């Protein structure tokens, strides 16, 4: 698609970004900017960073934003570019726009309601919807990972985790079912092995306090009740480093500045990242992420 | 062998000794999981559909496929004989591979023949072929409407729908991809 034919999509994109900012400002969030070029990227199992000289481009603003939470910034949000090596497809770009926000003193469940409020505000500036058959203003359907897997894949990844099978079944058996839903879908209670930087649920240490939102079968947002335990965080980074090394992936230095901030104390908080380009895909009604980005 | 970074729509790959063409391709990465490559594909020989998901570390078979420029020569029972334009070598192609193209073949027609492990498995004809109408109801004189159609047969019995003004003996152009009438060719 050439640039001039993206006019409508890019005009909507600008209106959506304005609406997003007003939404958070009206809720007493502070807009922040954190480094795009970072000394070390957040280490995750399957996310590779682009090198930038002797540093890296951020794969997510998470660790810097959490340092701000540790420093007492109670409600912060950021919209900006993130970079992931080798990710290009209909729903992926190696450079894309992430919306990320943190709210001190709440758990991830509170963010379900707030994300739905955000979707409503955004749907309004885009004509109200429905968008490709999905009503963004409707209350979400909420499922646990266990119930979805038991129903559509015949096993419970929380009881007996198998990483490879989990990825395949999620993509081949579960996500196609979610694509038929006509309202936003929240999938919660991920297995501990897929906790990433979420804490465990107090009532069940096998379950991470993490949820993902799907819209029309496309993963839109990922939320945690954040892990605040510095020791456990260090262990998770170390385990991740070992696994990356075992797979022949680059191992990044541990982010000691972040770990030090955690050691000094991080308040209970919830955080969430939402793919702005994917949200726009839905609002515009396209299956190609490149259609909603000027240069992609 | 191909790696997953080679995968794209239109790529021809080999699975269990069969050649496939990828008809739909998607890079996916389920929440915090590994990169996966979802492919929908079609068996080039049988037309059967297949879905496969690959991990980034997997290798995918590369089929021994070769397309050659060949000219159609003559029918030989259940086979059709083509000649390699470069080597003049003669090759017989099975009627199953030729399919409905058998109605459109004309002597010395330039074709492309696809070989898999040296066996012809697919045939490409020129997009348009000109054929004489052998049989049809007489057309109404002056009726130039192109949206009302009637049945007609070409010399080898193949039936197509043509506009009312077409008569027996007219030369018409047929799209070999769809097997449908395109237009009338003015006689010189």
Image (cartoon, helix red, strand yellow):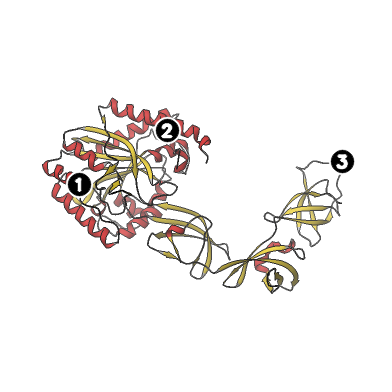
Cβ–Cβ under 8 Å for marks 1 and 3: no
Would you name the residue on which mark 3 appears? B142
- State the image quarter where residue A141 is shown: top left
Can residue A125 be seen in the rendering of this structure?
yes
Furthest residue in direction left, as rendered: A264
- Name the residue located 46 percent from the left edge and 67 percent from the top edge: B1
- Name the residue located 13 percent from the left edge and 50 percent from the top edge: A231
Q: Quadrant of the C terminus of chain A?
A: top left
* Residue A13 image label: 2
Left-right relation of A174 to A192? right
**In the depicted view, which residue is nearer to us: A6 or B141?**
A6
- Return the x and y of residue A175 as percentages of the image width and height: 39, 50
Q: Secondary structure at mark 2?
A: helix
Mark 2, residues whose alpha carbon is within 10 Å: few (<14), some, or many (≥20)?
many
Q: Are marks 2 and 3 on the same chain?
A: no
Mark 3, residues whose alpha carbon is within 10 Å: few (<14), some, or many (≥20)?
few
Would you name the residue on which mark 1 appears? A199
Q: CA–CA distance between discs 2 and 3?
A: 56 Å
Looking at the rendered image, the disc whose residue lies closer to the viewer, 2 or 1, is 2
Left-right relation of B41 to A19? right
* Residue B100 image label: none
Furthest residue in direction right, as rendered: B141
């Amino acid at each position: 698609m050439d640039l001039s034919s993206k006019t409508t999509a890019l005009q909507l994109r600008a209106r959506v970004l304005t609406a997003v900012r007003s939404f958070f400002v009206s809720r007493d969030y502070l807009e922040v900017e954190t480094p795009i070029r970072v000394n070390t990227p957040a280490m995750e199992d399957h996310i590779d960073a682009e090198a930038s000289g002797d540093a890296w481009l951020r794969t997510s603003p998470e660790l810097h934003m959490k340092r701000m939470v540790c420093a007492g910034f109670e409600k912060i949000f950021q919209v900006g570019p993130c970079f992931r090596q080798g990710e290009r497809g209909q729903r992926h770009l190696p450079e894309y726009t992430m919306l990320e926000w943190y709210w001190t003193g709440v758990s991830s469940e509170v963010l379900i309601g707030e994300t739905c409020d955000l979707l409503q505000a955004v749907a309004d500036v885009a004509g109200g919807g429905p968008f490709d058959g999905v009503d963004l203003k409707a209350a979400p359907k909420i499922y646990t990972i266990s119930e979805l897997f038991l129903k559509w894949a015949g096993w419970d990844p929380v009881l007996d985790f198998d990483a490879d099978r989990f990825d395949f079944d999620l993509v081949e058996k579960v996500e196609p079912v979610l694509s038929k839903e006509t309202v936003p879908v929240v999938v919660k209670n991920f297995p501990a092995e897929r906790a990433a930087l979420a804490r465990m649920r107090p009532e069940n240490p096998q379950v991470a306090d993490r949820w993902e939102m799907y819209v029309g079968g496309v993963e839109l947002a990922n939320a945690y009740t954040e892990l605040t335990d510095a020791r456990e965080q260090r262990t998770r980074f170390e385990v991740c480093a070992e696994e990356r090394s075992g797979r022949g992936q680059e191992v990044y230095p541990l982010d000691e500045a972040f770990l030090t901030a955690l050691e000094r104390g991080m308040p209970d908080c919830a955080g969430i990242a939402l793919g702005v380009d994917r949200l726009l895909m839905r609002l515009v009604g396209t299956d190609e992420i490149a259609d909603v980005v000027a240069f992609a | 062998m191909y790696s997953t970074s080679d995968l794209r729509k239109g790529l021809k790959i080999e699975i269990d000794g069969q050649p496939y063409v990828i008809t739909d391709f998607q890079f996916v990465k389920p929440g915090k999981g590994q990169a996966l490559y979802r492919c929908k594909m079609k068996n080039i020989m049988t037309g059967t559909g297949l879905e496969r998901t690959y991990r980034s570390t997997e290798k995918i078979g590369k089929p021994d496929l070769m397309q050659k420029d060949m000219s159609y020569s003559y029918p030989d029972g259940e086979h059709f004989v083509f000649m390699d334009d470069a080597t003049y070598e003669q090759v017989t192609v099975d009627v199953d591979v030729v399919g409905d193209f058998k109605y459109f073949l004309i002597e010395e027609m330039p074709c492309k023949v696809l070989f898999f492990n040296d066996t012809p498995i697919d045939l490409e004809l020129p997009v348009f072929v000109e054929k004489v109408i052998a049989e049809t109801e007489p057309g109404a004189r002056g009726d130039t409407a192109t949206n009302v159609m009637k049945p007609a047969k070409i010399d080898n019995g193949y039936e197509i729908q043509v506009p009312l003004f077409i008569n027996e003996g007219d030369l018409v152009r047929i799209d070999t991809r769809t097997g449908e009438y395109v237009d009338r060719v003015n006689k010189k």
